[in-house]
Image: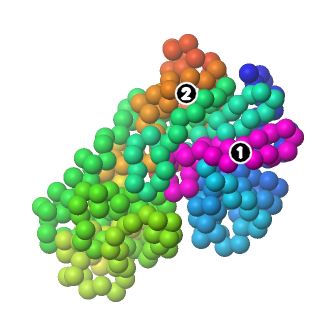
Amino acid sequence: MIADFAWIRPEPAGLHIIPADVWIDPPRAMPRALVTHGHADHARAGHGVTMATPATLAIMRERYGDIGDAQALEYGDRVSLGGGVHATLLPAGHVLGSAQIVIEHAGERVIVTGDFKRAPDPTCAPFVVAPCDVLITEATFGLPVFRHPPIAAEIARLLAARAAHPDRAILVGAYALGKAQRVIAELRVAGYHDPIWLHGAMERMCRLYADHGVDLGDLRSAAGVPKAALAGAIVICPPSALADRWSRRLPDPVVAMASGWMRVRQRVQQRGVELPLIISDHADWDELTGTIADINPAQTWITHGREEALLRWCELHQRSARALALVGYEDDAE
């Protein structure tokens, strides 16, 4: 069992796999990087070599253009990183291409979850439970108050709002990578097959999802569409556009936002949200604690998020744990 960060340790540039000199989700450009998924606080441009799933690399190219040398790692492939270290990627269930990183060295096995969730999601591969000695877990929603409702119930609320306001557009703020596509896919699962209209900032990533086999149905650009034509329509936009001049061209929009943070009343009020949708792509409290129990590691290391509460839970359940206090990872865009 790893003691005192003998071969993997938190440093200002991220988690460092010392024998292989490889970094996991480094917040600045490094010679060699393993990247868990495509969100900007984990996937940066400029690394000498970027190792990630094919979908994550495609997302990075879509966002950054040329990302230099890249090594595509399929789920389940075990590769040598040098220095006696091997890595395997497993699905994390967060967004398209997201991965847990399994690191093996000197008979020890570490799993870095990256961002993850356990709830079903039609747009990405589900989280895989695997054994390890040390589990390095996120804790974005690591407080008992964060218990996310079933997404089907939130989608039903969205469709009920549309039925109740046939003369208004339903404007849904959702992060452009992952959240927007999940909301669209869940609307299709619920039987909504009308066109869904997109803010321009959503179009490229939705096309990328479609190119990777995720069926999002009939999507159309909202640009230039007459105001009256969007009455009763569902329109997806980035959260930043909810209060932007762009939204004023819609017919009296019902302002909705899809985020785990919609559990917090103050955030709902700050955003001016009429219809808060508690839809998260991160594990909630029960998923975090349940995952630790399912994997049953000898040690749990807790990173970005609400580390203190999850650390205390581990202590109360006689589980060895420590907080890493890594910096550079954001949660507001969740």
> Which residue is outermost to the front?
77
Residue 300 x %, y %: 62, 26
* Residue 85 part of the magenta segment: yes
Instruction: Give whichever of 200, 220 is nearer the camera.
Output: 220
Task: Quickly name the residue at label 1.
Answer: 78
> Which numbered marker is on residue 295?
2
Q: CA distance from mark 1 to mark 2?
A: 20 Å
* Residue 38 part of the magenta segment: no
Q: Quadrant of the N terminus?
A: top right
Which amino acid type is shown beneath numbered disc 1? Arg
Who's the residue at 44% across and 40% down the image?
A: 118
Report the side of 44 relative to 238 (left or right). right
Q: Is residue 195 positioned above or below 179 on the image?
A: below
Report the side of 166 relative to 271 (left or right). left
Q: Is residue 24 positioned above or below 255 on the image?
A: above
Who's the residue at 59% across and 53% down the image?
A: 37
Number of other residues with Cα within 10 Å of mark 1, as a class: few under 14, some 14 to 19, many 20 or more: some
Which amino acid type is shown beneath numbered disc 2? Ile
Residue 93 seen in the current view: yes
Instruction: Give whichever of 266, 309 is nearer the camera.
Output: 309
Residue 305 x %, y %: 54, 38
What is the span of residues highlighted in magenta in the rendered image? 76-101
Look at discs 1 and 2 and give the one toward the viewer.
1
Report the side of 168 relative to 3 (left or right). left
